[in-house]
Image (tube, rainbow, N blue to C red):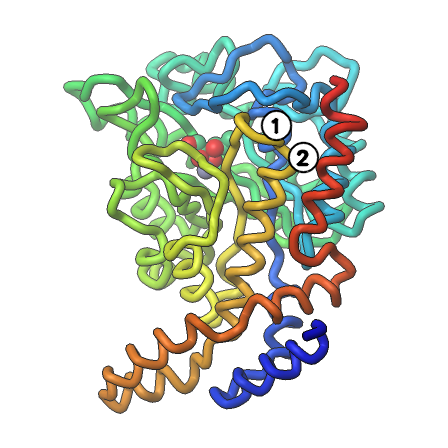
């Protein structure tokens, strides 16, 4: 059967549930997905290529061909863009500056990121931003919560610089730049004084946010974490800390799939958090037994996250970002697999007859809710996905992989 005929059949099957597949495709394409730059070079950045990765995160694998310069990273990301349908943003870390100048993190300026703005403009994509507190001589175990005021002040200055850069991104590109603060501070053993670092972190954040920035152009979001390598017992910026801080101060909260106890899922937190914080940023990742940042696959949690957004109409309040880094396979493929999966799961969420299921639930017909939810799983969403890719002018099915292999042979394998 050709695609057209198969799609007609699928359209009919979904219509029987009251779902318009054409509309689902349009909606799924319109939701921005913010793709992280750091899958392309194992979170290395271009500030100091020899600095190791610190902050308790780790990439594993040494697959050849990682991007060594900003130009290489952009060229690789162009490949990802050519495989990825729908509205896209690129999420940069502060260590991805593109300049010949030697500049420390507390002196970063918009001009150090100008090539990225040009790149984003040319491709019609938005930019998001992340302060980088790790992989620096002053990172240590504590940055914004350090007992040493001089170190705290350095990181406060860094954050302020980054907010100015984020504001510039947003202004230049005409869309809000979501700026994520992930502060790795923590300890291997539980400290006796768990309070003082948290007080200091709160004070540092208050000082940072006293700097006015235009919320049309940038909004800050705070990412909690349960543990890291070397900070197994205590993380200053825990979930409770930020849920409290963001609720109190009306700030955005970032939920990363890998930052909770292994059986805790962020899909279950979205509707609660949004009762108390204005907006959420998501770091969609895949933890395997720990915060391992495996490539996002189509698992139940990915689907549950997207369903939660769509079922509640949270598209304007939940900002989907990706966060994984796999150095054991072709990096462009890793990037693409996870990003396409995010869009696929969004599409499936829009193919759900939400109104019907909610009505059945309100009527107390839980039998039908479960029965239909299970029947829906075997509807032919795959063909709707193919049509989505076609409509967006992106490769259908495995075609992208064939192209990625050619690029690997011709470009990345020669690095
Ligand atoms: C670390 C956090 C954080 C980083 C990136 C590189 O556990 O998830 O978001 O992955 O900032
Ligand atoms: Zn994260």
Identify the residue at the far front of this view: 1
Relative to 349, is 63 on the left or the right?
Answer: right
Q: Which residue, given by chain and number where applicable, does mark 2 sit on?
A: 165
Q: Which of the 4 quarters of the picture holds residue 371?
A: bottom left
Q: Is residue 256 above or below residue 198?
A: below
Q: Are marks 1 and 2 in contact (CB under 8 Å)?
A: yes
- Nearer to the camera, 108 or 360: 360
Q: Earlier in the sequence, mark 1 or mark 2?
A: 1
Kindly identify the residue that appears in the image at 52 percent across and 32 percent down.
Answer: 325
- Nearer to the camera, 409 or 212: 409
Quadrant holding the N terminus = bottom right
Query: Does dot 1 land on a helix, a strand or a loop?
Result: helix
Query: Does dot 2 land on a helix, a strand or a loop?
Result: helix
Quadrant holding the C terminus = top right
Relative to 276, is 406 on the left or the right?
Answer: right
Kindly identify the residue that appears in the image at 56 percent across and 41 percent down.
Answer: 179
């Amino acid at each position: 059967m050709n695609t057209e005929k198969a799609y007609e059949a699928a359209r009919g099957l979904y219509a029987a549930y009251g779902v318009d597949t054409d509309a689902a495709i349009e909606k799924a394409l319109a939701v921005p997905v913010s793709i992280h730059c750091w899958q392309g070079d194992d979170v290395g950045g271009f500030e100091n290529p020899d600095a190791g990765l610190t902050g308790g995160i780790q990439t594993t694998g040494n697959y050849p061909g990682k991007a060594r310069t900003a130009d290489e990273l952009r060229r690789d990301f162009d490949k990802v863009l050519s495989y990825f349908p729908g509205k896209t943003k690129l999420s940069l870390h502060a260590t991805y500056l593109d300049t010949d100048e030697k500049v420390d993190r507390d002196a970063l300026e918009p001009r150090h990121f100008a090539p990225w703005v040009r790149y984003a403009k040319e491709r019609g994509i938005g930019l998001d931003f992340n302060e980088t507190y790790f992989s620096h001589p002053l990172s240590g175990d504590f940055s914004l919560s350090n007992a040493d005021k001089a170190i705290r002040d350095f990181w406060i200055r860094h954050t302020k610089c980054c907010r100015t850069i984020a504001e510039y991104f947003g202004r230049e590109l005409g869309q809000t730049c979501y700026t994520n603060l992930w502060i790795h501070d923590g300890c291997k053993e539980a400290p006796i004084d768990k309070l003082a670092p948290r007080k200091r972190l709160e004070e540092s954040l208050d000082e940072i946010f006293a700097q006015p920035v235009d919320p049309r152009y940038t909004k800050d979001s705070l990412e909690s974490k349960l543990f890291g390598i070397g900070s197994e017992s205590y993380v200053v910026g825990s979930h409770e800390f930020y849920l409290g801080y963001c609720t109190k101060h009306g700030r955005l909260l970032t939920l990363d799939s890998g930052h909770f106890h292994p059986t805790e899922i962020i899909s279950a937190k979205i509707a609660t958090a949004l009762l108390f914080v204005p907006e959420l940023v998501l770091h969609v990742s895949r933890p395997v037994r720990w915060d391992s940042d495996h490539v996002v696959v189509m698992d139940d949690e990915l689907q549950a996250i997207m369903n939660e957004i769509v079922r509640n109409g949270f598209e304007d309040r939940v900002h989907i970002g990706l966060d994984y880094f796999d150095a054991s396979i072709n990096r462009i493929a890793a990037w693409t697999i996870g990003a396409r999966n995010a869009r696929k799961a969004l599409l499936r969420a829009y193919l759900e007859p939400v109104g019907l299921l909610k009505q059945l639930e309100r009527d107390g017909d839980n039998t039908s809710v479960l029965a239909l939810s299970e029947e829906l799983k075997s509807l032919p969403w795959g063909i709707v996905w193919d049509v989505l890719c076609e409509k967006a002018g992106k490769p259908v099915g495995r075609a992208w992989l064939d192209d990625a292999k050619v690029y690997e042979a011709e470009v990345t394998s020669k690095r």
